[in-house]
Amino acid sequence: MTSNRPSASHRVDEAVIIEVAVNGETRPERNPHVPRTPEAVTDDVLACLEAGASLIHAHNEDITLAGRAAADSYLAAWQPIMDARPDTLWYPTLTAAARGAAGLDHVVLLKQDIGLRICPVDPGSTNLGMPGPEGLPVGLVYANDYGEHPQRLRSV
């Protein structure tokens, strides 16, 4: 069978963008290696950048924080990163505490405080689930109304 994929030597000279999502909502109880504290996020992100990462996505310690509290939580990890690597391209997650444009209040503050250059936009919905204690599915529907996005983007 013949492959249409380029050979490894062909791809050597092509640019590659490596995006790293350093933590998400995974907790240390599930995976003790996931960075959750600001210090651990700082250390892991700097290591990923040194290894060649181009773009970083990270959550803070508490996705339910909003506004200044969420921004300050991110700043605890990201101020040292931006001081060391001011060219870093990164973005936080949306907050679970606020709907509509208020869900990006922390992004506006991060833009003002450390020059955040991109932000998340999650249109639509997805089901997030896992087996519960009795083996039955538990979870939630993560949803963002399409009508909210113009308002959100204007706020940034």
Image: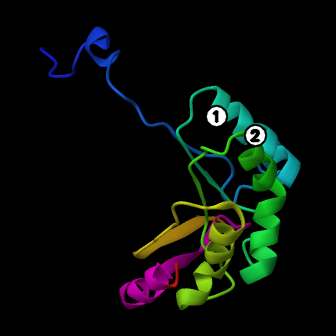
- At which x and y percent is residue 31? 77, 45
- Between residues 124 and 66, which one lies in front from this camera angle? 66
Q: Which residues are magenta?
A: 132-154
As displayed, is residue 76 above or below residue 52? below
Q: Nearer the viewer, mark 2 or mark 1?
A: 2
Spatial CA distance of label 2 from label 1 is 11 Å
Vertical comparison of 143 with 36: above or below: below
Question: On the rendered structure, is 42 left or right of 90?
Answer: right
Considering every residue shown, the one lying at the far top of the view is: 9
Up-down relation of residue 51 to residue 84 (above or below):
above
Q: Is residue 65 visible?
A: no
Residue 152's spot in the image, x, y percent? 48, 84
Nearer to me, 91 or 128: 91
Q: Amino acid at mark 1?
A: Leu
The local crowd at label 1, few if under 14, some if 14 to 19, many if 20 or more residues have their Cα within 10 Å, is: some
- Colour setting: rainbow
Q: Is residue 46 left or right of residue 138?
A: right
Q: Quadrant of the N terminus?
A: top left
Tell me which amino acid carries mark 2: Ala
Asked if 89 appears above or below 97 in the picture, the reply is above
Q: Quadrant of residue 104?
A: bottom right
Q: Residues within 10 Å of mark 2 (few under 14, many from 20)?
A: few
Secondary structure at numbered mark 2: helix
Left or right: residue 117 versus residue 110 is left
Residue 16 vs residue 123, the one in the foreground: 16
User: Which x, y percent locates residue 77?
Assistant: 80, 54
Determine which quarter of the picture holds residue 138: bottom right
Please tell me the numbered disc located at residue 49: 1
Q: Which mark is residue 84?
A: 2
